[in-house]
Structures are given as structure tokens and as C-alpha cells.
Image: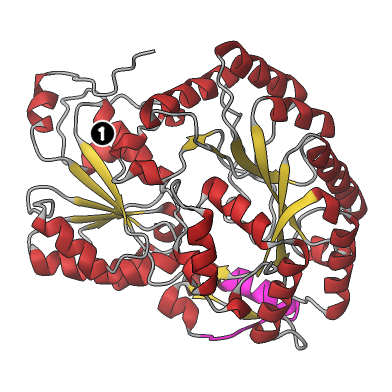
Amino acid sequence: MTRQWSTAIGAAMRIEAERQAVLFVSAGMFAPKKRDHALARRQLYLNYGALALATRCELNGVPARLVHGEHERPEELAARLYEAGEIRSDSPVMLSIPSFYALPWAQVFCEELVRFERGVQIIVGGRWVTGPDKDWLAGKLPLASKIVQGLAEGQIEQLLGYSLAGSQWQGGPLWRLNHRLIQGFQRYQPSIEASRGCGMRCAFCEERDIRLTDLQEPAALVDGMERLVEDYGDRDIHPYLQSSYFLPNLRWAGRLADETARRGIKLAWRTESRVDSIRPETVEKLAEAGLKVLDLGLESAAPTQIKAMNKAGNPQRYLEAASRLLEACAQHGVWAKVNVMLYAGESAHTLRQTQDWLDEHAHCIKGVSVGPVVVYGPPRHSAEFMCELQRLGASPVDPDSAEDLGVTALHLSSTLDECEVEARALELSRRYMSQTDYFDLKRFSYYPRDYTHAQFLADIAASDASRLPFRLQ
């Protein structure tokens, strides 16, 4: 099926489209946010929010492209872009900062852009970073021409300086992102937006108060899958169905299975959800539709911690539902990757409760990711949450880090300081995840598509084994 992505919408738009391609840059990081080793630096994170904006430009006849900073030095990337003629005073750089961990990189990148071209306009987005405190961020990025809070989808044409005389840009569905706009797109596993929001009010979640939208229609998602096959030129791709809270019912899952079968689209895909929401009978239909990896936010199996997180009001019922879902995943060949969050007030007793529960379900688990709760945002945004965590027994490792970086690491209790938390997190991850499991999960979604097992073994050899979250074989 042929699809026309570049759509002219009038003579005025055609004139505007003659300008150079709009450059979107996804800010990189100086080091991986968890542990810095060769394997972590291989990971690629597609900025599908920035890609949605680039796709919207291209859909309306305005050329655009997206470059990811990854772990490239910001000085080197800025120089490369300038030498290619992409840093100019007549075309803004759209800088997306996907995480507070990317802020130091973005600061240097902005400085380098202005050094090369003093008149360049830098428009900064990335709602999780720009939303909490615009004044604070402006102080961190004084060279930014504009900071955009919230989603930019409805204002991208104004940000780029287009005058449409009352007409509106075509929106374009986000499940049909044009991945070809990404520099080196073949290296990245693609994304399809399935739904937005969550609204389940977990204490640590940025989307706790954002209403969950309905899932995209199965036919629309399969349209997106077909588009990806066209873009990539093969079916050896593993789309991530982006959804903070993937919540399909049996009927929806059955329709998706029927639609993929009818069109002969059988891509293996991944998504994430809660452990207490997808019914076991739904898993069978999702597996028929191609679901291969399900990221599950268990967080804890200790009742006191489940309640402290506001994860569930009835921990017993929550864990029973989690058991049923994990068993269903194992039965239908779906890899379950379980996320565990070590929370404020954690103790040897609560860790043991979580470990005992995971031990009972180890046969259903492909891998476990373990890490401590982290407080994000500057003081004005994070103070209330920090007070709640301190009430539970946590304390900041560096009281100034919220103001300095927008990221605050924690000592979780009087018996679990930052160093001990890291040791226990690694211990727990290794208990349930071998290096084969780790490779399978990372290569499915995050490693470059051409990353080989031989490269993986070489990266293990080049890494500090004490920092690796899996059992060596």
C-alpha cells in the first residue's frame, strides 16, 4: 500500500517548505543514567515525541529530520551539524530534552550551537523536563530562545514561524510515525503510540494524574505496522507499542489478532503495563497478535511498600493478579520483564518479601530490572514528594541536587544507604537474569538492530563485571 507522507497544503506552505529541513535534536547524555559500562552505552532510546513533531512537519510539506545525541559528545555533534550547514540563523534548532539526566548535555550543546552561529534560535521542549518549573529551567538554559511546556503538537507551526492565514496544519496520527526522518533510522527499533496517560495515582509516577486514553483501534495499529515494514524494508523489526499503561480487554485483543492475521502482519512487539490489569485470557490473543515482551511494573511484593507507593489498596489481591498474569505469559510464550522499585522505608524484611515472591515466580520471568526510587524535578516541583519520602525514612544523598540537576538520589532508610541499595539491586537482578536473558531483552528493543552476540561478548569483556546486572555464563 502506497502512502504519501509529504502533503502540500497551499501556495504559502509551498514557499515556506523551500527553507532548509527543520532540525530536531534529541539531547544525549554524558553517561547512562543507571550504570556506566560498555553495554549500557550501546543502548538506543528513540525519542518518539520528537519524531511525532518531525513527522507532522513532513506531513505538511516542511522537510524535517531528527538526530539523536546518544552518547556522542555535544561539542562533536554541534560541530558535525555546523559543518553540514544545518546550524543557521534562519532556521531554529528544535532541542528535545527527554530526561533530567540529559540536561547537562543539553547545556553544553546549546553553548556550542551559539559559538558556531550566534544568531541561531534554540527552541527547547520535552514535557517532563520543561513542565515542572519553567523559570528554573530558563536559568539552566540561558541560551534557549524559547522553552515549550507540555505537548508541542498543537503549536509546532507557530514555533517554526509559519503564517497560515487561519488554516491549520494537518495533525497526522502518531501510530504512523515516519521513522525515515531519523538519522540512521535502521539502527533503531521503531515505536507506535498505542495510548497515553495512566491516572492510577502511584506516588512516584509523573503520569499519576493524567487520564488514560483509549487504545488506538486495532486496524489503526496494524496500519502503523504495515507502514513500518515499508519504511524498514523488512519484517525483522520489533515495534514498541508506546503506552504507559497498556490496558486491552479480551475483545480488543481478539480484534488485533484477527487484523494481523487477515493482513499477514506478524511482527513481534513489546509494550508495558501493570501486573494487575491484563487478564490471563487476554494474553493468549495478544500473543497471537505478536506480543513477545511485556514490561511489568510490579515494583514490590512487600505489602507495606505496595501501600506506601500507592500502587494498590489491597496488596494481596494485587499480587494474586500478578501471579495469574505471569503464569499466562509463560504459558503463551511471552517474555515477562519485571520492574522492581526499591522504595523509601525499604528494609531487609521488605526486600526478603519481594525476593521470596519472585523466587516463587522465577520460572515465569525472563528478566528483572531493579532500581531505587529517584526524585525528579527542581525543588518547587519535587518538595512535596520529597517530604513524603522523608516521612517514610528516606533522605537525599545530596540536598542540593534538586536545585543543581533536577535529580535527587536517596538513601532509602537508616539501614539502606545509597551504596547498599545499589548492591542489593544488582544482587536481585542477577538472581533472576542470565546474560542470555539480558541480551535477548536488550537486543529486542534497545540495542542497535545490527548488534551481534559477538559484539555483546566483547562489551562484557570491556566492562566492569561488578556493575553488570546479570549472571555471567
x 11%, y 53%: residue: 84
Is the N terminus in the top left, top right, bottom left or bottom right quadrant? Answer: top left
Q: Residue furthest front?
A: 454
Rendering coords of residue 401 (x, y %): 48, 81
x 77%, y 62%: residue: 432
Q: Secondary structure at mark 1?
A: helix
x 44%, y 54%: residue: 44
In the image, residue 276 sits, relative to residue 115, either above or below, namely above
Rendering coords of residue 472 (x, y %): 67, 69
Question: Is 104 left or right of 213, judged from the image as shown?
Answer: left
Q: Which residue lies under the disc numbered 1?
A: 57
Q: Do we see residue 151 in this rendering?
A: no
Q: Residue 391 falls in which quadrant of the image?
A: bottom right
Q: Do we see residue 449 in this rendering?
A: yes
Q: Which residues are magenta?
A: 383-399
**Does the segment drawn in magenta span residue 349?**
no
x 78%, y 40%: residue: 329
Question: Is 269 left or right of 156, judged from the image as shown?
Answer: right
The residue closer to the viewer here, 441 or 24, is 441
Q: Residue 465 falls in which quadrant of the image?
A: bottom right
Is the C terminus in the top left, top right, bottom left or bottom right quadrant? Answer: bottom right
Question: Is 316 left or right of 382, judged from the image as shown?
Answer: right
The residue closer to the viewer here, 341 or 437, is 437
In the image, residue 167 sits, relative to residue 279, either above or below, namely above
Rendering coords of residue 468 (x, y %): 61, 72
Q: Residue 179 falls in which quadrant of the image?
A: top left
